Image (cartoon, rainbow, N blue to C red):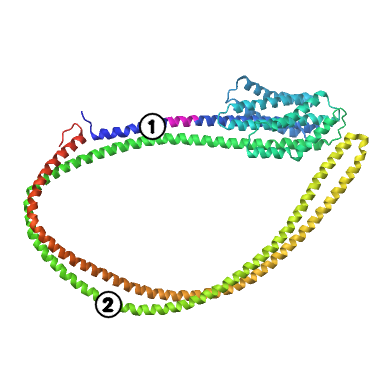
Amino acid sequence: MKVGIQTKIAGLITVPLLAFIVMAGISIKSDWEQLKIAQKTLEGTELFASVSDVVHALQKEREDLLLQLLDRRTAKEMAAQREIADRMFSGFAAKMAEHDFGPQGQAVLATVSDIKLLRKAVDQDGISGEAFDRYNHAIQSLIGFEVQVAHRIVLPGVTSSLLSINVLEQSRESADQLRATLLPVLMANAPLSTVTFTRIERLRSEIHINLESSLLESSPDVTHFLDTFKTSENFTLVMMIFDTIVAKANEGQYGLDLNGFYDAISGIVTDLDQPGMKILSQVRDSVGVATRAAERAAALMAAMIAVSTVVIFILVRVFTGRLSSSLELVAQGLMRGAGDVSEASRNMSGAAHGISTAAIEQTQSLSETTTAVEKISQMVRANADRAQGSKGVAEEAVGAARQGREIVSEVVRSMQEIHDGNTQLTTQITDSNREIERVIQVINEIGEKTKVINEIVFQTKLLSFNASVEAARAGEAGKGFAVVAEEIGNLATLSGHASKEINDMLKHGIEQVGQIVRESQEKLDRLAQQEMLKIGEGSEKARVCGEVLEQIGDKVETMKSMLVGIAEDSMEQARGVQEITEAVGDLKRVTEANSQLSEQTSGSADAMAQQSLELNQLVQGLNHIITGDREAA
C-alpha cells in the first residue's frame, strides 16, 4: 500500500520539528535551573546584606556608649539610633523566615532579641564592661553567621566576594573593640592589667591578620584600598598610640589626647566600611544581571517553541495542500497537452503551406530594404548640418576658455598671497608657544618647591608627635626635649616663609602668562584682519572666474547636444545597414528552407506521435504518485 505525497512531506517536516522541540525542552530546563540558582543567590545576597546591616547597627549602639562616656552623645540621640536598629532587626527577622538555618539560625535570632534586654540593663545599671562584652558577643555571632550565609551560595564568584566582605567586617570589628577597650583605660590613666594587655595585643594582631587574609578578593579596587589604608595617617597614628600605651602599660599616666585617639580610630572604622559596601553593590549588580538573563532566556525559548510549533504546523498544512493541488492540476494539464500533441501530429501535413508563405516573406524583405536605404540618405544630410553648427559653437567655447584661464591665474596669485599670510601667522603662533613653554617651566619649578615644603610640614608633624611621646615617657628627664620642640617650631616657621615665597612666585608667574597671552592675541588679531582683506579679493576673483566657467559650460553643453544628435543618427545608420544585411540573409534562408520543409514535415509527424505516447505514460505515473492508492484520472 503506497502513501500520497502530502503524507510523505508532512512526515519529513514533523520529524525535525519533534527533534527541535526535544532539544528546546532540554535548553528550557537548563535555563530554569540557572534562573533558580540566580534567584537563590539573590536571596542569599540580600540576607547577607541584612546581617551586615544588623552588625553595623549594633556597632553603632556600642559606639554610642563610648561617646556617652566622653559626653559627646545625648540620650535623645541614642534613642533615635535604637529606633533605626529596631527597623533593621525587623527586616532581618523577615528575611530569616524565608530560609531554614536550623538551630543556629534560631540562636542568632535569639541573640538579636536579647539586645532589648541588654539596653534595659544599660539604662538601669549604667555602662559597664559586661555590657560591652555582651555587645561584642552578639556582633561576633552575626559575623560568624555571615560565613554560613556566604557558603550556601553556589553561583561562581559570589561566595568569594561575600567572604571578602566578611573579612573586612572582622577587621572593622577588631578595630571597634580595640577602641572600646582602650578608651576607658586612657580615661583612667591607670596601668594595664594582664587580661587587658593580652586582649589589646590580640585585637591588634587580628586587624593585621585579617588585612593580610588570602580570602580578600584580589580585585584592583580592593588591593588599592588595602595599600592606601595601611599607609594612611589615621592608621599610622593609631599604631603609634598603641605602641605608647604598651610602653607605659605598667606605669599608666599615658598623657594622650582622648578626643584625638577616638577620632583617629573612628576614622579607621569608617574607612573599613567603604570597600565592603562597594563589593556588595557589585555582587548585587552581577546577580541581578544573571537573574534577568536567565529569565529572558527561558521565556524566549518557551515562546520560540510555541510560535515555531504553530507556524510550522500551519505551513506544513498549507504547503502540502497547495503542492498536492498544484501537482494534480499539472498532471491533468499534461494529459490534455498529450492529447493536443497527438492531434497536432495528424495535422502536420498542413505545414506545406509554409512554402507559399516564404514567397510572401521575400517580397516584404525587399520592400524593407528600399525603405532602409532612404532613411540612411536622410540621416547623412542631417549629420552634415549638425556638424556645421558645431564648428561655430566650438570657436566660442575656445574664446571663453582663454578668458577663464586668465582669471584663474589671478585667483592663483591671490591665493598665494593668502598662503604667505598664513605662513607668517603660523610663525607667530610658534613664537608664542615657546614663550608659554618658558612660563610652564617656571610653574614646574614652583611645584617642586611646593613638594619640598609639604614634605617638611609632614616631617614636622611626626617630629612634634614623637617629641611629645618621648617627653611623656621620660617624665622629668624629658624636659630636655623642649629644645627639640623649639627647633621643630623654627622649622615650621621656615616652612611658612617658603610657602609665602611660593605664593608670590605664583602670582608673578600668572601675571607674566597673562601679559604674554594678551600680546599674542593682539598680534593674531592684526594678522587676521590682513588675511580677511586678501581673502575677500580672492573670493571676488573666484566668483568672476565661476561665471566665465559657467558660460563655457553652457557652450560645451550645446556642443555636446549636437554631437549626441550626430552620434544617434550614426547609430540609426548602422542599424539601417544591419537591416539591409539581415533582409538579404532572410531571402537566402527562405529559399533554402523551401526545399527542406517538405522532407522534415513527414519525419516530424512520426516523432511527435511517439513522444505523445511516452508523455501520456509519464503523466499517469505522476498522478499515481500524487494521489497514492487512488486511480489516475
Magenta stretch containing residue 534, yes or no?
Answer: no
Res. 601 mark: none
The image shows residue 459 at horizontal and vertical percentages of 81, 44
Q: Nearer the viewer, residue 333 or 391?
A: 391
Identify which residue is drawn at 74% across, 39% down: 231
Magenta stretch containing residue 28, yes or no?
Answer: yes
Instruction: Please name the residue that numbered disc 1 is placed on.
Output: 21
- Total tally of numbered discs in the picture: 2
The image shows residue 297 at horizontal and vertical percentages of 47, 35
In the image, taking residue 189 as reference, residue 89 lies left or right, namely left
Instruction: Please name the residue that numbered disc 2 is placed on.
Output: 384
Q: Nearer the viewer, residue 68 or 437?
A: 437
Question: Main SS of the magenta segment?
Answer: helix
Q: Which contiguous range is marked in magenta?
A: 26-33
The image shows residue 552 at horizontal and vertical percentages of 41, 75
Which of the two discs, 2 and 1, labels the residue nearer the N terminus?
1
Task: Assign the N terminus to one quadrant of the image.
Answer: top left
Residue 214 position by quadrant: top right
Q: Is residue 618 above or below residue 197?
A: below
In the image, taking residue 561 as reference, residue 136 lies left or right, namely right
Q: Residue flagged by tag 2: what amino acid is it? A: Ala
Identify which residue is drawn at 76% across, 58% down: 506
The image shows residue 269 at horizontal and vertical percentages of 72, 35
Q: Residue flagged by tag 1: what amino acid is it? A: Ile
Q: Is residue 404 above or below residue 474?
A: below
> Which residue appears farthest toward the top when viewing the image?
103
Residue 333 position by quadrant: top left
Question: Tag 1: Cα neighbours inside 10 Å, few (<14), some, or many (≥20)?
Answer: some
In the image, taking residue 98 as reference, residue 494 lies left or right, namely right
